[in-house]
Image: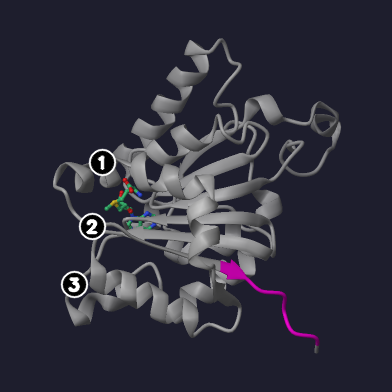
Amino acid sequence: SDHTLVYPASPSAMDWSPHYPAFVDEDSSQEAAGPPRLRKDVEIVDIGCGFGGLLVALAPLFPETLMLGMEIRTSVTEFVQERIWALRNKSDGKQYQNAACVRANSMKFLPNFFRKAQLGKIFICFPDPHFKARKHKARIVSTTLNSEYAYALRPGGVVYTITDVQALHEWMVRHFDAHPSFERVPRDEEQADPCVAVMTRETEEGKKVERNQGQKFVALFRRLEDPPW
Ligand code: SAM
């Protein structure tokens, strides 16, 4: 459970160097205070990344963008880490340096990992549906959590959602539509976004739905500019 989770006290305290060794800023290692710094910040997050299919498919598409999977299950996190290390080795260290996975409860510690407006994309792919009404508070999309996603996303950034559960899709749309920081991305833009094709086809859960000939419901939400004071 959560008391075994390790998370940084603040984004600047997070040591990303073991996760993205190829992106360590060599000049920063001389600095006395704080962990080694990277040349870039994480900009894409996959919430509840599962076995890492999305990361592994996206990493070569955006080789200069750092992406992070957050996964609460220890064994699954380790699987994804090993999967990424193996892919790095196989490519002689040339590819997959921009992908990593940490064990984290994204419902609790997101602001410990990311500064305000740091992220450009957040993926929420096939989240656990928590069907029963008394379990709805465990859903990864809610009014409170949407405010955390709004905090971490820069204006113009996008939250990508996909699910095979229609009631959950409607729940996510309802909660993002009601949130003042988000607007739904129109269908034509959604279709033209290469990440949508990846998210629809490449996650493990998406493949399972495909095999079972289930439906997939996609919705994207853009982070709006904050209104002037
Ligand atoms: N996104 C993957 C996919 O599409 O194949 C996995 C989908 S799976 C149904 C949901 C995943 O979210 C599980 O791996 C679960 O352990 C993870 N998860 C659930 N709650 C979480 C939380 N609070 N923080 C991080 N991960 C979580």
Q: Mark 1 touching mark 3, by CB under 8 A?
A: no
Q: Which residue is mark 3?
A: 131
The Cα–Cα distance between marks 1 and 3, rounded to whole angstroms, is 21 Å
- Which three-letter amino acid code belongs to the residue tagged 2? Gln
Secondary structure found at label 3: loop
The quarter of the image holding the C terminus is bottom right
Q: Mark 2 touching mark 3, by CB under 8 A?
A: no
Whether label 1 lies within 8 Å of ligand 1 gets the answer: yes
Whether label 2 lies within 8 Å of ligand 1 gets the answer: no
Q: Which residue is mark 1?
A: 207
Percent coordinates x, y for residue 204 in the rendering:
29, 40
- Which of the two discs, 1 and 3, sits closer to the camera? 1
Q: Which residue is mark 2?
A: 215
Left or right, 36 with reference to 194: right
Whether label 3 lies within 8 Å of ligand 1 gets the answer: no
Percent coordinates x, y for residue 71 in the rendering:
39, 48
Q: Which residues are magenta?
A: 222-228
The overriding secondary structure of the stretch rendered in magenta is loop
